[in-house]
Image (spheres, rainbow, N blue to C red):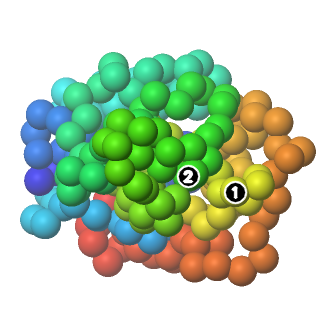
Amino acid sequence: MYCTSYESELIGKLILASEGESLVGCWFENDRFFGYGVDAPMERRDDLPVFEKTRDWLDRYFAGKAPSPQELPLAPRGSEFQRRVWSILTEIPYGQTITYGDIAKRIASETGGKMSAQAVGGAVGRNPICVIVPCHRVMGAKGNLTGFGGGVDTKVALLEHEQVDMTSFFRPKKGTALEGRPNAAASFASV
Protein backbone atom coordinates (compact mmCIF):
# COMPACT_ATOMS: atom_id res chain seq x y z
CA MET A 1 0.00 0.00 0.00
CA TYR A 2 1.36 3.40 -1.00
CA CYS A 3 0.58 6.94 0.07
CA THR A 4 1.36 10.52 -0.80
CA SER A 5 -0.01 13.90 0.18
CA TYR A 6 -1.73 16.74 -1.61
CA GLU A 7 -1.80 20.28 -0.28
CA SER A 8 -4.87 22.46 -0.80
CA GLU A 9 -5.06 26.12 0.18
CA LEU A 10 -8.79 25.72 0.79
CA ILE A 11 -8.85 22.75 3.18
CA GLY A 12 -5.24 21.81 3.95
CA LYS A 13 -3.52 18.50 3.44
CA LEU A 14 -5.14 15.42 1.93
CA ILE A 15 -3.53 11.99 2.19
CA LEU A 16 -3.90 9.75 -0.88
CA ALA A 17 -3.56 5.96 -0.82
CA SER A 18 -3.23 3.36 -3.57
CA GLU A 19 -2.38 -0.30 -3.93
CA GLY A 20 -0.40 0.72 -7.02
CA GLU A 21 -3.13 0.94 -9.67
CA SER A 22 -6.29 2.45 -8.17
CA LEU A 23 -7.07 5.12 -5.62
CA VAL A 24 -8.27 3.46 -2.41
CA GLY A 25 -8.10 6.48 -0.11
CA CYS A 26 -8.18 10.25 0.01
CA TRP A 27 -8.56 11.47 3.57
CA PHE A 28 -8.49 14.79 5.34
CA GLU A 29 -5.54 14.95 7.70
CA ASN A 30 -8.02 15.12 10.60
CA ASP A 31 -10.52 12.60 9.17
CA ARG A 32 -12.50 10.72 11.84
CA PHE A 33 -12.16 7.54 9.80
CA PHE A 34 -8.64 8.14 8.52
CA GLY A 35 -7.31 4.96 6.90
CA TYR A 36 -10.70 3.27 6.63
CA GLY A 37 -10.48 0.29 4.26
CA VAL A 38 -6.68 0.07 4.39
CA ASP A 39 -5.41 -2.80 6.48
CA ALA A 40 -1.71 -2.66 5.62
CA PRO A 41 1.06 -0.19 6.44
CA MET A 42 1.49 2.54 3.85
CA GLU A 43 4.82 3.38 2.24
CA ARG A 44 5.41 6.91 0.94
CA ARG A 45 5.61 6.94 -2.85
CA ASP A 46 4.90 10.16 -4.70
CA ASP A 47 5.50 9.05 -8.29
CA LEU A 48 2.69 6.57 -8.97
CA PRO A 49 0.67 7.38 -12.13
CA VAL A 50 -2.59 7.11 -10.16
CA PHE A 51 -1.32 9.80 -7.78
CA GLU A 52 -0.39 12.05 -10.70
CA LYS A 53 -3.89 11.64 -12.18
CA THR A 54 -5.44 12.32 -8.78
CA ARG A 55 -3.32 15.45 -8.24
CA ASP A 56 -4.41 16.72 -11.66
CA TRP A 57 -8.06 16.00 -10.78
CA LEU A 58 -7.71 17.82 -7.45
CA ASP A 59 -5.92 20.77 -9.11
CA ARG A 60 -8.84 21.18 -11.50
CA TYR A 61 -11.41 20.80 -8.72
CA PHE A 62 -9.76 23.41 -6.51
CA ALA A 63 -9.42 25.72 -9.55
CA GLY A 64 -13.24 25.76 -9.75
CA LYS A 65 -13.70 23.15 -12.45
CA ALA A 66 -16.10 20.21 -12.08
CA PRO A 67 -14.10 17.06 -12.91
CA SER A 68 -16.01 13.78 -12.79
CA PRO A 69 -15.11 11.10 -10.24
CA GLN A 70 -15.38 8.59 -13.10
CA GLU A 71 -12.15 10.04 -14.57
CA LEU A 72 -10.15 8.27 -11.86
CA PRO A 73 -9.63 4.56 -11.14
CA LEU A 74 -11.43 4.43 -7.80
CA ALA A 75 -11.43 1.31 -5.64
CA PRO A 76 -12.78 2.21 -2.19
CA ARG A 77 -12.76 -0.73 0.19
CA GLY A 78 -15.86 -1.45 2.20
CA SER A 79 -18.96 -3.63 2.38
CA GLU A 80 -21.22 -4.12 -0.61
CA PHE A 81 -23.74 -1.72 0.94
CA GLN A 82 -21.07 0.94 1.55
CA ARG A 83 -19.78 0.68 -2.01
CA ARG A 84 -23.35 1.06 -3.30
CA VAL A 85 -23.79 4.26 -1.26
CA TRP A 86 -20.39 5.59 -2.37
CA SER A 87 -21.31 4.90 -6.00
CA ILE A 88 -24.46 6.99 -5.57
CA LEU A 89 -22.33 9.80 -4.11
CA THR A 90 -20.30 9.95 -7.33
CA GLU A 91 -23.51 10.81 -9.20
CA ILE A 92 -24.28 13.96 -7.17
CA PRO A 93 -23.57 16.87 -9.52
CA TYR A 94 -20.99 19.51 -8.64
CA GLY A 95 -22.63 22.34 -6.70
CA GLN A 96 -25.73 20.34 -5.76
CA THR A 97 -26.76 18.55 -2.58
CA ILE A 98 -29.04 15.70 -1.52
CA THR A 99 -30.05 14.26 1.83
CA TYR A 100 -29.26 10.98 3.51
CA GLY A 101 -32.99 10.27 3.26
CA ASP A 102 -32.91 10.79 -0.53
CA ILE A 103 -30.19 8.15 -0.83
CA ALA A 104 -32.08 5.79 1.48
CA LYS A 105 -35.24 6.17 -0.63
CA ARG A 106 -33.31 5.47 -3.81
CA ILE A 107 -31.74 2.29 -2.41
CA ALA A 108 -35.11 1.13 -1.03
CA SER A 109 -36.70 1.73 -4.44
CA GLU A 110 -33.95 -0.20 -6.22
CA THR A 111 -33.98 -3.13 -3.81
CA GLY A 112 -37.68 -3.26 -2.99
CA GLY A 113 -36.81 -3.24 0.69
CA LYS A 114 -36.53 -0.72 3.48
CA MET A 115 -33.56 1.53 4.11
CA SER A 116 -32.86 4.00 6.88
CA ALA A 117 -31.18 7.37 6.52
CA GLN A 118 -29.04 6.42 9.55
CA ALA A 119 -27.62 3.37 7.75
CA VAL A 120 -26.81 5.57 4.77
CA GLY A 121 -25.21 8.10 7.13
CA GLY A 122 -22.92 5.41 8.52
CA ALA A 123 -21.74 4.51 5.03
CA VAL A 124 -21.34 8.13 3.95
CA GLY A 125 -19.30 8.86 7.08
CA ARG A 126 -16.86 6.07 6.25
CA ASN A 127 -16.33 7.19 2.66
CA PRO A 128 -12.58 6.65 2.21
CA ILE A 129 -12.24 8.92 -0.85
CA CYS A 130 -13.25 12.38 0.35
CA VAL A 131 -13.74 15.32 -2.02
CA ILE A 132 -13.58 13.03 -5.10
CA VAL A 133 -16.46 10.85 -3.88
CA PRO A 134 -18.36 13.92 -2.71
CA CYS A 135 -19.81 13.04 0.69
CA HIS A 136 -19.69 16.77 1.50
CA ARG A 137 -22.74 17.18 -0.78
CA VAL A 138 -24.97 15.08 1.52
CA MET A 139 -27.10 16.94 4.07
CA GLY A 140 -29.21 15.91 6.98
CA ALA A 141 -32.95 16.41 7.12
CA LYS A 142 -34.21 19.98 6.87
CA GLY A 143 -30.79 21.42 5.95
CA ASN A 144 -28.69 20.12 8.84
CA LEU A 145 -25.04 20.15 7.77
CA THR A 146 -24.51 17.25 10.20
CA GLY A 147 -21.15 15.97 11.34
CA PHE A 148 -18.46 15.45 8.76
CA GLY A 149 -15.28 13.34 8.82
CA GLY A 150 -13.07 16.38 8.23
CA GLY A 151 -15.16 18.70 10.40
CA VAL A 152 -18.14 20.86 9.54
CA ASP A 153 -15.94 23.87 8.69
CA THR A 154 -14.29 21.78 5.94
CA LYS A 155 -17.71 20.70 4.64
CA VAL A 156 -18.84 24.33 4.51
CA ALA A 157 -15.62 25.38 2.74
CA LEU A 158 -16.12 22.72 0.04
CA LEU A 159 -19.79 23.63 -0.47
CA GLU A 160 -18.99 27.34 -0.67
CA HIS A 161 -16.18 26.54 -3.12
CA GLU A 162 -18.81 24.86 -5.31
CA GLN A 163 -21.01 27.97 -4.89
CA VAL A 164 -23.81 26.08 -3.17
CA ASP A 165 -26.47 28.42 -1.76
CA MET A 166 -25.93 27.96 1.97
CA THR A 167 -28.92 30.02 3.18
CA SER A 168 -31.15 26.99 3.87
CA PHE A 169 -28.50 25.02 5.80
CA PHE A 170 -27.62 25.18 9.47
CA ARG A 171 -24.69 24.01 11.55
CA PRO A 172 -25.31 21.46 14.28
CA LYS A 173 -24.47 22.68 17.78
CA LYS A 174 -23.20 19.33 19.03
CA GLY A 175 -22.11 16.02 17.56
CA THR A 176 -19.19 13.69 17.12
CA ALA A 177 -17.81 15.15 13.91
CA LEU A 178 -17.96 18.90 14.21
CA GLU A 179 -14.18 19.22 14.11
CA GLY A 180 -12.82 15.92 12.81
CA ARG A 181 -10.11 14.09 14.77
CA PRO A 182 -6.95 16.15 15.29
CA ASN A 183 -3.74 14.46 14.08
CA ALA A 184 -5.57 11.42 12.72
CA ALA A 185 -3.06 11.04 9.88
CA ALA A 186 -0.07 11.12 12.22
CA SER A 187 -1.21 7.93 13.91
CA PHE A 188 -1.46 6.07 10.59
CA ALA A 189 1.19 7.27 8.16
CA SER A 190 4.02 9.75 8.07
CA VAL A 191 3.27 11.86 5.01
- Dot placed on the residue nearer the N-terminal end, 2 or 1: 2
| Picture residue at 65% right of the left edge, 51% below the top | 139
Q: Find residue 126 and report its image quarter.
A: bottom left
- Identity, as a three-letter code, of the amino acid under mark 1: Ala
Residue 71: image location, x then y, percent:
33, 20
| Picture residue at 86% right of the left edge, 47% below the top | 168
Q: Is mark 1 on a helix, strand or loop?
A: helix
Q: Quadrant of the C terminus?
A: bottom left
Q: Find residue 114 and report its image quarter.
A: bottom left
Q: Is mark 2 on a helix, strand or loop?
A: helix
Left-right relation of 71 to 21:
right
Q: Which residue corresponds to mark 1?
A: 141
Q: Compared with residue 171, is residue 162 higher up or lower down, i.e. above or below?
A: above
Left-right relation of 6 to 153:
left
Q: Which residue corresponds to mark 2?
A: 100
Left-right relation of 131 to 3:
right
Q: Distance between the residues labelled 2 and 1?
A: 7 Å
Residue 136 visible at all: no
Q: Give the crowd class for mark 2: few <14, some 14-19, many >=20 residues within 10 Å.
A: many
Residue 180 visible at all: yes
- Identity, as a three-letter code, of the amino acid under mark 2: Tyr
| Picture residue at 48% right of the left edge, 20% below the top | 67
